[in-house]
Every structure is written in structure tokens, then in C-alpha cells.
Amino acid sequence: MSAAADLALLVPELILVGAALALLLTARRIRRARLAALGTVLAALAAAVATVWARGPGAATGFGGMFAVDGYSQFFKVLIAATLALSALLAADRIDRERVPRAEYHVLLLLAATGMMLAVSAQDLLILYLGLEIMTLCSNILVGITVERPRSNEAAIKYFLLASFASGLLLYGISLTYGVTGSTGFADIAAALAERGPGSNPFLLVPLGLVATGLAFKIAAVPFHAWAPDAYQGAIAPVAAFLAAGAKAAGLAVLGRVCLVAFGSQAHVLSGLLVGLAALSILVGSVIALPQTDMKRLLAYSSIAHAGYALLGLVAGTPEGTSATMTYAFFYVFMTLGAFGVVIALGERGRDLDGYRGLATQRPGTAALMLLFLLSLTGIPPTGGFVAKFVVILSALRAGHVALAVLAVACSVVSAFVYMRVAVLMFMRDPEREAPSRSPVAVSAALAVAALVTLLGGVLPESLVRWAVSP
Amino acid sequence: MSAFPILSATTFLPLVGAAVVVLLGSERLARWIALATTVATVAVSAPLYWRFDKTSSALQFVESADWIPAWNVGYGMGVDGISLPFVFLAALLSVLCVGVSWTAVQTRVREFYVALLVAETAMIGLFAASNLLLFFVFWELMVVPVFLLIGVFGGPGRVYAAVKFLLFTLAGSVLMLVGIIALYRSCGTLDFKALALARASLAPGEQAWLFAAFLAAFAVKVPMFPLHTWLPDAHTEAPTAGSVILAGILLKMGAYGFLRVSLPILPDGVRLFLGPMLVVSAVAIVYGAYVTLAQTDVKRLIAFSSVSHMGFVTLGIFTLDQRGVEGAILQMINHGILSAALFLCVGMIYERTHTREIADYGGVARAAPVYATFLALFCLAATGMPGLNSFIGEFLILGGAFETRAWLGAMGVLGVTLGTIYMVWLFYRVVMGRLNPGLEGRKLELGAREVATLAPLALLAVVLGVYPEAVLSYLRVPVAELLAGGMP
């Protein structure tokens, strides 16, 4: 394949990198963060369009088979582009107030998204690693970008330490995989493993476990979740939103491909691991969210639980299961961005639970949107969260994990209590503080998009369900 | 069959009304829009009743459209003789809810009517849905507005009651969700009729599990003993309209679920659980009635009486006898009318006195003869007085119960006796005797709007008492079909 054809596969990533470079070059001239946000949004849209446009018949691979553009990667790239655009909108006004370098913030967002896109297209463990590391590094700086806040520094250091540790595990797993199979390419790994037959090599358990652990860190699945609450709480809300939505979607995408394609023949081993991760994430995430009073921390634990729900799809080790996880990731991204968006829209008041008291009388629209996102996070129809929950539980039942499915729904009652606590404060208590100022246009736009997708996707999920096709 | 989708129009008209209330943003107009919407909904639904073919057990006014072809799930609406009366009841009670809230709700009026109208869509949609996914969507859609109605507009303990209601309902419904998904996995469809045909592919053991999963949701909603503890709190703290919706429709959703899902699709599960279900129903009847006797709060008293009355309903359903099931459905309608009417009565006087303690009342008949007359009618009807509506329902259920197991009938009769005691005693303490000094000088008599709100229910109570055939004629064929359809 010619170099030009290889590069053609990279168009979405190139657009994002190009935008990042352009922003860097013009950084001194950008006086308003809104301008940088606009550039980021346009770049994200262009990348999404390029992703969809590039859709030829079937999948295309390039760079010696290390990079693929297929339906699976396109799905996630569009999702990542949407995350990027919404995160940029959510950040637009906030970073002006936080004395954050404006252009640089958006450059980091763009580069992190580029890393995610590379990772979801990767057909080789090394490309995958590179993509995830670009993402992690940029996210890490974003977490610590408010340098004047001690909390933010603390969060960045914690995130850095744990993320490096996870990266180390992942890399170690990759090298051991190479040792066992003689390759880092997914297709070669699959072929080598298929040759050996299922479960014949105990040495394989270690690399499998290490790779899975490394990726579990990225999606903050229990017991590898400890960084998430601190990182989300310490980071400014737009960064937390980006991390919660984008990093998790990318991590799930990568995990899905690795489990299904590279280690498909080891499904029986992986399934055991994933069941454990899913059950623990759902249980711990739901239960520990109960006593939280900091909104970002609450959403962090909720996102941990949601990682568990999304894993329910991968447990089956089947293409249908992976499709279920894709659907889950899709709706999760929008409802999470929406919930964080409300937190951002409320400014100082959005930070702790008490700030939500009486919101419905002061800002009925915002309260109604928050209710929608909370219902979706709980999984109540007719929202996207319900469709998502439906498909993953179906997938778990198909795989015969009845107990896991029951645990999942039982925990969704626990999480309903968590989310409805916010609803109770908003609707059933009297306000104690002054009404928050009107939310900026950019934030409102992002909220509107998130709400529209959450609601429309819940009422008419057909096209999404058809679109979410596993590799 | 007409091309006009009557059922969808009936279902979604309130939702449109809710949207209009939101968009117009006027508090004054909200009431009028809500009233217009609910009345229009009744009007739109009118052709359903006279064009309905009572000789057929098939779903009628069927509408189907593609919804999620990838899952083989369509958008399907349709009513049969079992569901049609509930569509009417839901539409009627919604109008009355608007009427009773006209002056009672003074704050956040728009939100109130939006919640009420969304709840109406959910209620009607639930009874009109012809597949399980749509059923579940409406089932859950019901929870949120009721949660808000209780929690925002309710009494002093409203938040506790609302959260308790929400958690109980959700705990039940998520298990139902697992059941639905498991059914879907086994049968590959969620259409009620197709599921009934595909049930042969379900092993008895699987059916038992599925029955248990659905039971969790239905038993909470009915509510069956011992899952009834959310009910007294929710009914008591809810605003009048909320209590009416809860007692009138929401409680019927669970029993309707048994008729729509458990009996036709999971007969082996029903057979396995039959004994326990009957025992629990009998316990609910007697225990509910005993606890009712001890209540000092009017609303709480009516709420607990619902536990007892709904025990009759589940008893009737699980007699699996034509008379018993018909009686149960008739009794669901009757209870919907009477408990709604009683809550309306309580709400109307509460609006004037701001107390629900029975001890604060007494001699109301002297100050408000019209009110006392209505209350007398509804209380007598609730005791099962011949000539009023509950009599026939209870009679049929008891007939069915004696047929199945004599001791069940005996328990039922005990329940009726206790029911007469607490109802008459309530009436005696509130209405008879000397006027309570605390009430002197207050204007207790009903206004024209309130009389207009109560009159339809009073009329129904009498009409159904004299001519129960008005409902029974709809039920006969579908119930026979339901019981003949492979029930043991």
C-alpha cells in the first residue's frame, strides 16, 4: 500500500493534529477562550465528517496492518469527536475564569482525542499503547492545568503515578504477549493463539491479566479505580467530563477489540476476569457513590459503576456482546457529558450537593435537564441509558450470567438512590443560595446536544443499534 | 378499523398538552390547558367504547409500526376487553385530578400539571401497549411524575414518602426488566400475543423464575403483603391528585400485569406460585383490614383499606375461575372509582381544615350536607353495599374463592365484615354527631366545581352497582379466552 493511501486512513487524526498545531501557532493571538473552543469544535466536526466520509466497503488497513479503519473504529471515532466537541464547548467560558492558558488547553484536548482515535483504530498492541499514552499524558496535564490550585496538583500527581503504573503493566503485558506469541499484531496474536488451542499455555495467563489490568485502569474499573475520584475532583469540571466520557469510551473500545480480536480464543479466561471487574465495579461504584457530597466525586463513582455495566457486554466474548458495549459507551458518553455539563453550568453552586437545593424553582430548565441525565444514568426509559442497560443485560443473560445481571439491576436501584438524592434536592427542597447566573451559550448548546441524543436515542434507538457493529 | 390511530392519540395527547404547558409558560393558563387536554383525551377516546366489539377476545384498534426492527420489537398498541375499562378510568380520573387541584395547588402550578399530564400518558399507554417493551417504558414513565407529585406537592413527610415509593417501585421494576430481557432471550419477541404462543419453549423451571421476576414488580405496585409499606406513606403524603392517581390507577397496574403477562405467558409459573399467592392475598385482605381499623388519619385509613381491597383483587385473579377473574377486574375498576372518590372527598375537606386527623372532625353533616351525602355514598359503596358497585365485584370474587377453596372465601367474608366496620366507623366519626367545635364557623360545604368533580364518580358507583354488565360485558370473552388459553 502506498504512503498516500496509508495517510488517507489517518485523515481524522491529521485534522485534529493540524488544528492543534494551528492553535499552538496562533496561541498568542487568541484573546478569548471561546475562539479556541470554536476552532476545536470545528476540527472535531471535520474529523467526524472525515471519519464517516472515509467509509468504503468493508475495512481498510494500512501501515503494514497496524492500523485499521473499520466500522468499529469509525463508531468510536465519531463518538470521540463528539466528546471532544462537547468538552470544548463546556470548557469555553470556564477556562477564561480559571486563568488557564486558553489555546494550550484546547491543544491538549485535541491531542488527547487524537491519541484516543489512534488507539481505537490500532491493530497492533504497540500502536494501541502509543495512542493510549498520548491520551493519558495529555489528560494528565489537563488534570493539573489549574496550577494555582493545590487540589489540582495533587490530583495530577496521583493520576500520573497510577497511570504510569498502569501503563507499565500494560507494556509488560504487551512484551510478554510478544514473548508467547511472537508478535504484537492482533491478527498474528490471534493466529498464534488459535494454533495452540484454547487454554493450553499457562504462561499466557500473565500477559492476559496484565493487559486487561492496564486497560482496566484506563476505564477505572474496580479494583483499578482509585485514581478516578481524586482526579475528577481535583480537575476542573470540564476536564473531569472529558476524562469520564472520552477516556472511558476509548478504553472500552480498545478493551473490546483486544478481547474479541486478539485474545478471542482466550474468551473463557478473559470472561472470568471481566465478570470480576464488572461485578466489583458495579457494586463498589454504586455503593460508594451513596455517601458522596462532592458532585464530581459522586459522578466519578457513578462512572466507575458505569464502566462495570459497559463491561457486561464484553463478558459474553461475542460480537453481539461487544455491540452492546458499544451502545452502552455511546449513551454513557452523552449522559455523562450532560451531567457534568449541568455541574459546569451551575458554576460554584454545582460543586457540592447542597448547591442543588431548590434548583428547580430558580432554574427549572437546568433542573429538568439534570433530571433527564440522572434518569438516563439510572437507566429509566425512555432515555438512552435504558437502551444501553437493556442491551448489556441481554448480553450478560445470553452468556448465562444470570446472577451478574441480577446484581447489576439490584445495584441500579442503589444508584437510583444516589441520583434521585440530587433530584430530591433540586425539586423538593427550598433554595438556600442565590440563583446561579445564566449559563453561557456554549454550555447551553452542549447541554442541548447531550439531552437531545440522550432522549432521541432512547426513544428511537434503531439506527444506533444498527450502527454499533463489533469488529 | 379506522385509519385514525385512536389509541396513540389518546395516549400522547396529554404529553402534547404537557409540552404546551411548558412552552406557554403561564401559570394561569396551565390549569385551563390541563383541563382542556384531559377533557379532550376523554373525548378522543370515546369511539373506543362504542366501536368496541365485545364478542372478540382479540386486541382491537390495533396499531403497529416499526420501532426497533433490529430487536424485532415494534411499536404496538391495542386494547381488549380487559384493558379498555382502564383506559377510560385513567382518562376520567385525570380530568377529576385537574378539577380537584384547581385551587389546592397554588405553587409551581405548571410543574404540577406537566407531571399530571405525563402521568396520564403513562397510565393510558400502559393499558394500551401491546408489547412488553412498550409496557415497560410506560411502566417506568409513570414513576417519575408520581415521584415528583408526591415529593414536590405533598404533605410534611413528602420527601421520605416519595423516595420510599421510588425505591420500592424501582427495586421491583428492575427485576421485571431482567425478566423481560430473559423472556426476550428465550422467545425472541416481546409482543404479548406472540409471547403467549411462544411460551411452550419455556421450561417450567424457567417460567417459575420469570414469574418471580415479574412478581417482584407487580407485587410492589399492587401492593401485595408484605411489600405494601410504601403505600400508606405515599398515599398519605401525596397531594389529592397524586393519591387519586396512585389509588385509582397505579395500584391497578400491578394487577393488570398479572393478567397481561403472568397468566397468559407463564402458566406453569402461575401454577407453581398459586398456593402462596392465594395465601398472601388472604393475609392482605384480613391484615389490611385490621390495620385499617387502627388508623387515626383519614388518608392513612383509606390507604390501608386499599391494601385490603387489592387483596381481594389478587385473590380473584388467582382463583383462576371465570367469575373470580371477572370479579377481580370489575373490583379493580370499582376500587379505582371509590378510592379515588374517597381521596377526593378527603382532599376537598382537607383544603378547608388542613387536618387529616379523624379526631378533628365530627358532625360534618350539619355544616356540609351535600358533602356528607357524597361521602355516605362512597363509604357505603366501599363496604360492599348491594346496589352500589363494590358489591358485585366482591360477590363474584367470593364466589370464585369459595369455588376454589372454601377457607379463602371465609377469609374474604371476614375482610368484608371488617371493611364494613372501618368504613361505617370512619363515616360515623367524621360526619355524624355534634359538629366538632374546631370546625365551627368554617365554610365546609362543597362548591359547584367540587360537586362536578365528585358527581361522575358517584354516578359510576350507582350505575355499576345497578348494571355491572356495563363493565362485565367487556370482560366476558377475553377472560374466558385467558383462562381457556392453557391455564391448568
Image (spheres, helix red, strand yellow):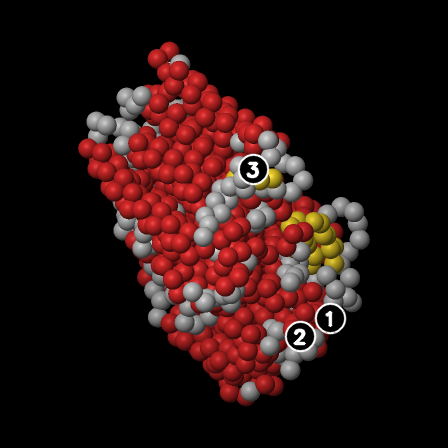
Q: Please identify the quarter of the rendering in which residue B184 is found.
A: bottom right
Q: Position of residue A3 (x, y in %)?
A: 56, 29
Q: Nearer the viewer, residue A315 or A194?
A: A194
Taking the spot 57% from the left edge, 49% from the top edge, the residue there is: A471
Say whether residue A98 is left or right of residue B481.
left
Q: Position of residue B479 (x, y in %)?
A: 68, 72
Circle nearer the viewer, 1 or 3: 3
Which amino acid, by three-letter code, is at mark 3? Gly
Q: Position of residue A62 (x, y in %)?
A: 56, 37
Assign a secondary structure to mark 2: helix
Q: Which residue is mark 3?
A: A62
Task: Please determine if labels 3 and 2 lie on a single subunit.
Answer: no
Q: Are marks 1 and 3 in contact (CB under 8 Å)?
A: no
Taking the spot 63% from the left edge, 61% from the top edge, the residue there is: B190
Residue situated furthest top in the rendering: A29
Say whether residue B320 is left or right of residue B80.
left
Taking the spot 45% from the left edge, 26% from the top edge, the residue there is: A17
Residue situated furthest bottom in the rendering: B406
Q: Which residue is mark 1?
A: B477
Q: Nearer the viewer, residue A145 or B242?
A: A145
Q: Are marks 1 and 2 in contact (CB under 8 Å)?
A: no
Assign a secondary structure to mark 3: strand
Q: Which residue is mark 2?
A: B200
Which amino acid, by three-letter code, is at mark 2? Ala
